[in-house]
Image: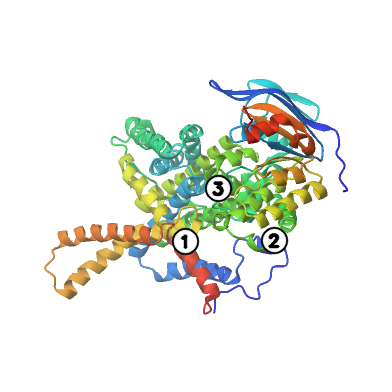
Amino acid sequence: MFYRETGQFKTSYAADQQIFPIRQDRIGVVLLLIAAFVVMPLAASNYWFNAILIPFLIFSLAAIGLNILTGYAGQLSLGSAAFMAVGAYAAYNFQVRVEGMPILVSFMLAGLTSAGVGILFGLPSLRIKGFYLAVATLAAQFFIVWCLTKFPYLSNNSSSGVISVPGIEILGIKFDAPQERYLLVLAIVALLALVAKNMVRSTTGRAWMAVRDMDVAAEVIGIRLMRTKLLAFAISSFYCGVAGALYAFCYLGSVEPDGFSLDLSFKILFMIIVGGVGSILGSFLGAAFILLLPIFLDIFLPWLSALLQLPFDGATVSHIQLMVFGALIMFFLIVEPHGLARLWQIGKEKLRLWPFPH
Amino acid sequence: MARQIGDVILDLKNISLRFGGVKALTDISFDVREHEIRAIIGPNGAGKSSMLNVINGVYRPQEGEIIFRGEHRRNMDTHAAAEAGFARTFQNIALFKGMTVLDNLMAGRNLKMKSNFLQHALWWGPAKREELAHRRKVEEVIDFLDIEHIRKTPVGRLPYGLQKRVELARALAAEPQILLLDEPMAGMNVEEKQDMCRFILDVNDQLGTTIVLIEHDMGVVMDISDRVVVLDYGKKIGDGVPDDVKNNPEVIAAYLGTQH
């Protein structure tokens, strides 16, 4: 009843090609942005900012990055954590070594550094595909972490490679409190998500998807495979790099190379698989699912065992948590292999027809 | 008929293509005139698809020469071919299945779009104007081929016959000078074949596009093509107007077998 396009006639291609063609979607996005920018900073507690909102936004950004590469351009990658590490360490170095470097410029340069490294490790994609490429990106994962541990220069001669980031200050305003850091992260993520959405709905995105779906046909219609794939690697790594910089500067405060392990790469990969491969919205949904579900189970399971008076101690509960978490991921993938974004899309399509099925 | 068959625009001379020891094409020469419908026929494995792949640069022949609009080349490459105005469809549909019909057609025009990814990222000025201008062109193709109702449908969800039509649409979206069609009617029922014939003739007639097509349905080939070249085991065994080809003893032998 509420969600339908009836009566919303498009009279120009501009109206039909806009980012959210359906009016209800536009209203929804505006409400969401108001909630994120205004309501949340007023309402949420420090725990919410530090443990939920900031990591959620940062991982969403990393998931968008991986989704551009894997979901849109079809190049499987297991190196996203490594590209985050490049971003984190690059931002740190720019910040520490260049006097008076504005933090936002550092983030930008961190993204660009990561993009450069991404192009380098994207070169094998010109010859190999699929699982073999995944193994090649695995090299990036191990090599970069090794590099950061091996060369003390990269961590400003810190003995174990751990870096502690300086405070954030933009135009004389300090971003120390959790909600200030939250707003900074939110602004960056919202902007980059918009940019990603614009790219995937234009010629750039179409070239990526064409290469993903049928590379021979893409070549025949004049898309240059090499340029398209490397651009996907560069932009994907840029997003991961910025996410890494935010991870160090706005979330943890101090990071070590081993923090950006293969586990983290897999976590980001799970996010896009659960959320929806080839969808910007799916990146957010997947990040929320993977990050929030353990927190939810953390609270819910002890409560449930207390309620039913089950004789479980803390260790058992945390084991059960892992099992339930795994089972839920499998459940979602069986019910909807295309991820939460597809569920959302199906829901919308049903709502458009509701209450009449045809 | 409004169209007038013009001069030779594509001339293939002594093309030979080998894959290791397998001779796919042996010393084949034929030409294509502007605005004509040129059919390539032959039994399975005769080298028809290889021939198309040579024309638009997917395969590089070991010997021979390709002359397109007076320009001599040893071989084509796919990008140069696309820029020179070749567009094609494939025997096994090669659409971008995850994308909508509209996006497939827009992708077909990618060579005509000049804005870069930074402009796309901001959806600003030239990028937006270009996107809308090309949308207009793409809508003309959509209108031409009667696929308005499916323009926002992901291609993978469409039935086979429509997918074939969308693939033709994607090729047309590039505004090609020469359209290469690899079995555009394979696997279709009679009605769908009639529709497709109509579209091919319309393209040729109204847009003036030169068409090179491979087809197995002899009725269709003899009806719509201006000239036919016949291949068998990678060799050319016949070339001419449909009536000549039909009565060529070698062609009959290749298709029906000979009495010993």
Residue placed most toward the observer, B191 or A75: B191
> Mark 3 belongs to which amino acid?
Met
Please give the name of the residue rendered at 75% of the width and 28% of the height, measured from the top-left corner: B30
Quadrant of the rendered image containing residue B74: top right
Q: Is residue A171 left or right of residue B58?
A: left
Q: Which residue is mark 3?
A: A209
* Residue corresponding to mark 2: A14
Where the C terminus of chain B falls, by quadrant?
top right
Q: Does the image show residue B80?
A: no
Nearest the viewer among A36 and B26 is B26
Label 3, secondary structure: give it: helix
Q: CA distance from mark 3 to mark 2?
A: 22 Å
Amino acid of disc 2: Ala
Residue annotated with mark 1: A342
Residue B140 drawn at (x, y percent)? 75, 55
Q: Residues within 10 Å of mark 3 (few under 14, many from 20)?
A: many
Q: Position of residue A182 (x, y in %)?
A: 43, 59
Tell whether A316 sits left or right of B249. Answer: left
Q: Residue at x 43, y 37 (%)?
A: A133
Which quadrant of the view contains residue A211?
top right
> Circle 1: is it few (<14), some (14-19), or many (20+) Cα within 10 Å?
some
Q: Secondary structure at mark 2?
A: helix
